Image: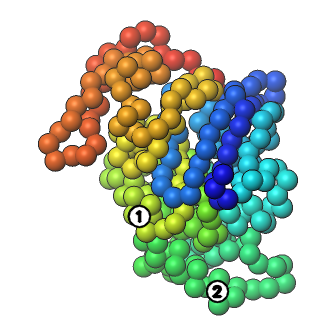
Amino acid sequence: MDCKEIVVKELEVGYDERIIVKGMDLQLKPGGVTTLIGPNGCGKSTLLKAMTRILKCRGGWILLEGREIHEMPTKELAQKISILSQHQITPEDITVKDLVSYGRMPYQKWYQGESREDLEIVQWAMKAASVEGMAGRKVRSLSGGERQRAWIATALAQKPQFLFLDEPTTYLDIAHQMEIMQLVKDLKERLDIAIIMVLHDIEQAMEVSDQVVVMKDGKKVAAGAPLEVITEELIEQVYSVKSRIVRLPGRNCPTIIYESLTGKAPAGAGR
């Protein structure tokens, strides 16, 4: 076992009496991008929240560096993993630099201010997320894509081994979606961290991912390299949609043409 990997075994997660994620096994190694895809309500975000300890597990376990994450001190865990959720609440009148500085909290004692190292890492995180030139701007003045990059910089300032992004392109227009996906590719190439995302767009997942995990009804249907896993048959099985996967000249990632429903749309198991 790699000392830095996350291992999920026989995981069950739910809300109230309802089990959403069922018998999940997963292995996340350092480096690269893993994307969770599947129909609405199949449990993608629930799984992400469980892996970041936002939700408790009903069964099974999640190991980081061979240790169960629910037994790790909160500050120690926050130094190893960070998450950008779908919905962020931005304090009024905060600047980009001040927002990114929040990412250093897991390393600070209550009686200490920012150290030189903190300031250097904040500067590094802003540069990595391409918001360095916006450091003094109010976050509320930013566009959707700029704001998302500022929050990614905040997550990077934690210096995590694993960065979790829950639907990072939701509510963004096409241009800002492309901007965030390009940032993900840049981070993958430049930083020694693993990025784990939830996405709805299959083509985006194929474009940026080293591994995709396909879910349906709370269970893993398939996992592996995108071009090997995502087939017309799998799309029909998981989404109840007939499609054609078309390779275009000059593009590494194929285009998916959705043609027709093959039956009732898949019922979601959860969130």
Residue lying at 56% horizontally and 58% vertically, measured from the top left: 30
Most extreme residue toward the bottom is 116
- Closer to the chain start, of discs 1 and 2, is 2
Q: Report the label total.
A: 2
Is residue 9 visible in this depiction of the protein?
yes
- Give amino acid for label 2: Glu
Figure colour scheme: rainbow
**Do residues under tags 1 and 2 come within 8 Å of each other at their CB atoms?**
no
Q: Residue at x 42, y 47 (%)?
A: 209
Give the image location of residue 80, x and y in percent. Answer: 68, 63
Dot 2 crowding, Cα within 10 Å, few <14, some 14–19, many 20+: few
Quadrant including the C terminus: top right
In the image, is residue 132 above or below residue 175? below
Residue matched to label 2: 117
In the rendered image, which quarter is residue 11 located in?
top right
Give the residue at x 39% y 31%.
230
The x, y position of residue 38, in whole percent, is 50, 30
- Disc 1 designates what residue? 189
Left or right of 99 in this view: 208: left
What percent of the width, then of the height, locates residue 168?
Answer: 50, 50
> Would you say 63 lies left or right of 173 here?
right
Q: Secondary structure at mark 2?
A: helix
Q: Give residue 97's position: percent from left, percent from top.
A: 56, 77
Q: CA distance from mark 1 to mark 2?
A: 24 Å
